[in-house]
Amino acid sequence: MTLKNTGETLPLGTPRVEEMYVTRIASAVRLRPGGQALVVTDVMGKAPDDTTVLLEGLPELDANVKIARTLCTVHGGKTIVEVCNASTDELILTKGTALAAATVVPKSAFNSLNSRRPTADNKDHPSPNPESKDSAWIDSVISAAAATPTTSREHMPGLEEDRLAELDVDFTDSKLGEEQRVLMADLLGAFRDMFCGNVP
């Protein structure tokens, strides 16, 4: 079987072992309700330095602790994990709590980025080169995008006039007093961009 994206060939029926490590939080962290934080974690085991890992939350974690699924690099046996508190209560994570599973991403997963070489068609915007660590190809793409002229600086002509126009609110069957009607009309006017007019 050949993987489309990477061109990697795998014989069918052979087992594939994934290298996985557990990460534990390096220091205690307090999270406010709905809060999130980037925390330093220790990778348990001997994960090689500069290895790219996919971080995912462990199933045995508290239901209120959410871990963002991210790619990260291991440096000195440590990696960064984004932790979120999904509860309405304050949450304290103690040092040494197992947070995430770190699965090693094989280097072949990134080979498709480096497979194309500059050709006559794309010599102005070459693909990344595995031998060079510079970001010149990224800079060329960004500068080309920035140089693209826009046809109009005003994306929606007439929007400002519509925004300034008086909002027509019908209070004929309303039991609101005059002061309440004015307040309600002001409130509706503040949210005018959420309403659309009647179409005949």
Image (spheres, helix red, strand yellow):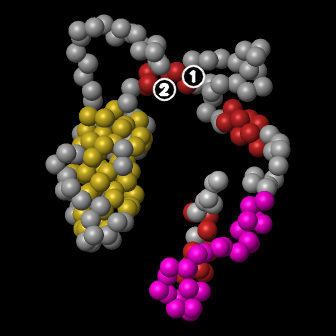
Crowd around label 1: few <14 · some 14–19 · many ≥20 (10 Å) = few
Residue position for label 2: 110
Residue 145 location in percent, x, y? 74, 39
* Vertical position of residue 106 compared to residue 155: above or below: above
Residue 26 location in percent, x, y? 29, 57
Residue 54 location in percent, x, y? 36, 38
For badge 2, the amino acid type reads: Phe
Depth check: give the residue in front, 46 or 160.
160
Q: Residue at x 56, y 85 (%)?
A: 181
Residue 29 location in percent, x, y? 30, 66
The reply to whether the magenta stretch includes residue 170 is yes
The reply to whether the magenta stretch includes residue 81 is no
Q: Find numbered disc 1 in the image and state the secondary structure of the residue it sits on.
A: helix
Q: Which mark is residue 114?
A: 1
In-image side of 92 versus 60 (left or right): right
Q: Which residues are magenta?
A: 158-182
**Mark 1 touches mark 2? (CB < 8 Å):** yes
